[in-house]
Image (spheres, rainbow, N blue to C red):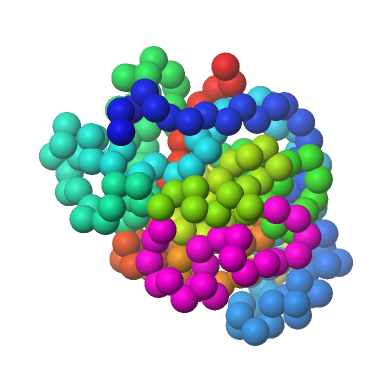
Amino acid sequence: MRVEQVNWVEIPAGLLCRGTPVDEVAAVARRYADTRVPVEWYAKEAPRAEIHIPAFRIARTPVTVGQWALFAAATGRPVSQTSADHPVIGVAWEAATAYCRWIGERLGLDVRLPTEDEWERAARGDDGREFPWGEEYRTGLANLVDLGIGTTTPVGSFPDGASPFGVLDMVGNADEWTSTLYAPYPGAPAEVPSTEDWAFDRHITRGGAFRHDRDLARCARRHGAYESDLEAIGVGFRLAAPAA
């Protein structure tokens, strides 16, 4: 696959209903109690706020092994043995940003990682939906642990799980780097930590990977790379750029 074949989706300027209302955090934790995620982790999503997001573009799918291989060959980096149409995983944040610069030079664009707010806007659209496809979780709309596949699948394999803008794989398959360092949202509950020094990398990741449960499929869910084995936990990335 040639680098020129990035499939961009134009995301119009608009309001993002970001995060989760403070008075709903406990109910969210109860709804996903079977995942054993503590309520404190959901509190990081609070409070809900309306944030204006300028127009931008985002890649329809994550960067694939085939796309990464061109960069790897040019820069002497390792190449994944997974099929070319699968998302590349095991990529450190610094390597992901290096790829953005490399491909940006070839495309003549300011290519970068999406911000956390841009990622949520691309996933949620114009409303406060819980998942990219709507309000209810449905097995089979994303490659998460409930499918039992245990590894990545070709990008775009779950078209019915698309976001309102038609962005694919926002949930499952590969967890995705953003350019945003973790910090509490303004007005966050007092128990929300000001830093996450225990994280392997403090940049926010979004969407969850094949090994993750359905709580990470939620558009509001904020987390990070808490383990150093980025391939085992399925960390990849997708591209963003200024609006056309």
**Position of 179 relative to 244 (above/below):** below
Please state, as top left, top right, bottom left or bottom right, where the C terminus lies in the image.
Answer: top right
Q: Tell me how many marks there are.
A: 0
Range of residues picked out in magenta: 133-153
Determine the residue positioned at 30% across, 28% down: 2
Q: Is residue 10 visible?
A: yes
Of 201 and 153, which appears nearest the observer? Answer: 153
Q: Is residue 121 visible?
A: no
Residue 149, magenta (yes or no):
yes
Q: Is residue 181 above or below residue 211?
A: above
Does 158 sit left or right of 210 as displayed?
Answer: right
Across and down, in percent, residue 168 comes to: 56, 46
Examine the rendered structure and indicate whether residue 58 appears above or below residue 133.
Answer: above
Q: Nearer the viewer, residue 126 or 37?
A: 126
Across and down, in percent, residue 26 comes to 79, 75
In the rendered view, does 148 fall on the left or right side of 214?
Answer: left
Q: x, y percentage for residue 38? A: 64, 78
The outermost residue toward the left is 76
> Percent from the top left, x then y, of residue 213?
56, 72
Q: Is residue 162 magenta?
A: no
Whether 6 is drawn above or below 237: the answer is above
**Picture residue at 55% right of the left edge, 22% below the top:** 242
Image point 28% across, 42% down: which residue?
66
Quadrant in which the N terminus appears = top left
Occupied quadrant, residue 152: bottom left
- Residue closer to the observer: 83 or 30: 83
Judged left or right of residue 4, residue 129 is right
Q: Quadrant of residue 20?
A: bottom right
